[in-house]
Image: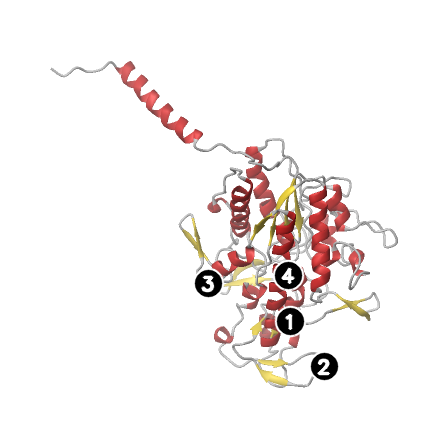
Amino acid sequence: MTRTLPLRIVLFSLTIVLTSCLKTEFESFEPSQGNADFSNYVAVGNSLTQGYQDGGLHNELGQQESSYPAIIAGQMKLANPSLNFVQPTISGQGSAYMHLVYRNGEIKVIKAYDEDITDNDPEAIHNDIAWETWGDTTKKYNNLGVSGIKLVNCLSGGRNTTLSFNLLQNSLNPNGRFLNFGSETNPITYLDHVKASKATFFTNWLGNNDVLAWSTAGGDDEPVVNDAGISVPGLFLSQLSDLDEFRYKYDSILTAFTNMGAKGVCATLPDVTSIPYFNTVTLEAIGKDVWIKEGADTNIIRKATTKDLLLLTASDQMAKGIGLTQSNPLPHTFALDENEIAIVQNRTNEINSAIRTLVNQHGFALADMNQFMKTLTNTGLTFDGVEFSPKYIEGGVFSLDGVHPNSKGYAIIANEFIRVINQFYGSNIPTVPIGNYRGITFP
């Protein structure tokens, strides 16, 4: 005879089983700091750190709130609830940005409104009115990322010393408006802000602009122009940073963190020539000859070859017919030739070698973003069953400017930092699901 257990016993047994399972799953994940202290996490860097994407600093859909430091901080807080990560977020449309529209049966990229030109698209997005007065210098921030900043401008000395102050002021770089940089006669350097941060833990991804600015200028030393429109002799916005100067100033940043007893992780520079900005406008995609003017001070005009990298901005020029005939060539600032590619790649390798050496000397962790980017370029990466590549728009990682990641891309970067932190410091902070973050917004 089959005996039937009372319902209350069955339910009680089931409760024990479920509780046991839940307890096991919970106990398998215990967030911890390891031998690090996340109570005051500070991020230093440039546009990648600040959460810049689509050619602007904006937050109308939480783009800036998806900066990789903000994502990391959210996960660190699971291990240290006392962490209060403050970053200077922008209101709404911020500094304006690129977006997509559906027009005449096609998806079209619309650039941000530019007050210096007369042929803006009717749907170009303007600066948010709050952008003009954005930046509260009385607050203490954990995210010190400033879009456009070079490592060599973080403290005085070396080449272009007079630019160390000017490049962080409103006139040339409003992205740093949230920090007080003093006056030209009594400047407060970026290094001073690092020293005042009292960080217990940090991430450092400074240095990208030290090679990127020259590359996006087509391998050109773009001069500083004064209010009268005249170039200032000897001063350049896009000059490749001197290696010795870079090494000395990078060491100064790490020494500041070492002196305050902080622990942290630094990142190498990716090969900028591998990003969509340099690999989207190709001869194959154009399907016709492209003519390039060789340099600023030469009359040599030649056909582009597959060894040249045409900048993403070259597409705007060719839409106007520039570069499609020998008589109307593409200016040299819209292409990197074979020699310029070798120059920037060599300088990137030299800087990364210096970073690795200094990080090792100071005993910090290293996130090799150069190698990480090579993997993305060569084989692609798969997260949560979704494949990602560096392909423009379709690859799922980069935003519309072809340089900066979208929110999914920043989540991927955050996870790599988290992996390195866990491995090096014995911490246990979880990565984030990439699918929880936005990619490019389609119309």
Q: What amino acid type is highlighted by mark number 2?
A: Asp
Nearest the camera: 18 or 132?
A: 18
Nearest the camera: 202 or 263?
A: 263
Q: Tag 3's secondary structure?
A: helix
Residue under pointer 3: 378
Residue under pointer 4: 351
**Structural crowding at the residue carrying mark 2, measured as other residues with C-alpha within 10 Å and reported as few (<14), some (14–19) or many (≥20):** few
Please state if 415 lies on the left or on the right of 202 as rendered.
Answer: left
Image quarter (top left, top right, bottom left or bottom right) of the N terminus: top left
Disc 3 or disc 4, which is closer to the eye? Answer: 4
Q: Tag 4's secondary structure?
A: helix
Residue under pointer 1: 218
Nearest the camera: 428 or 334?
A: 428
Asked if the residues shown at circle 3 and circle 2 are in contact, with their CB atoms under 8 angstroms apart, the answer is: no
Q: What amino acid type is highlighted by mark number 3?
A: Asn
**Structural crowding at the residue carrying mark 3, measured as other residues with C-alpha within 10 Å and reported as few (<14), some (14–19) or many (≥20):** few
Residue 78: image x %, image y %? Answer: 55, 34
Image point (67%, 39%), residue name: 86
| One can see residue 377 in this view | yes
Q: Which mark is residue 297?
A: 2
**Structural crowding at the residue carrying mark 4, measured as other residues with C-alpha within 10 Å and reported as few (<14), some (14–19) or many (≥20):** many
Asked if the residues shown at circle 3 and circle 4 are in contact, with their CB atoms under 8 angstroms apart, the answer is: no
Q: What amino acid type is highlighted by mark number 4?
A: Ile
Mark pair 2, 4: CA separation: 29 Å
Disc 3 or disc 2, which is closer to the eye? Answer: 3
**Mark 3 or mark 1, which has the lower sequence index?**
1
**Mark 3 or mark 2, which has the lower sequence index?**
2
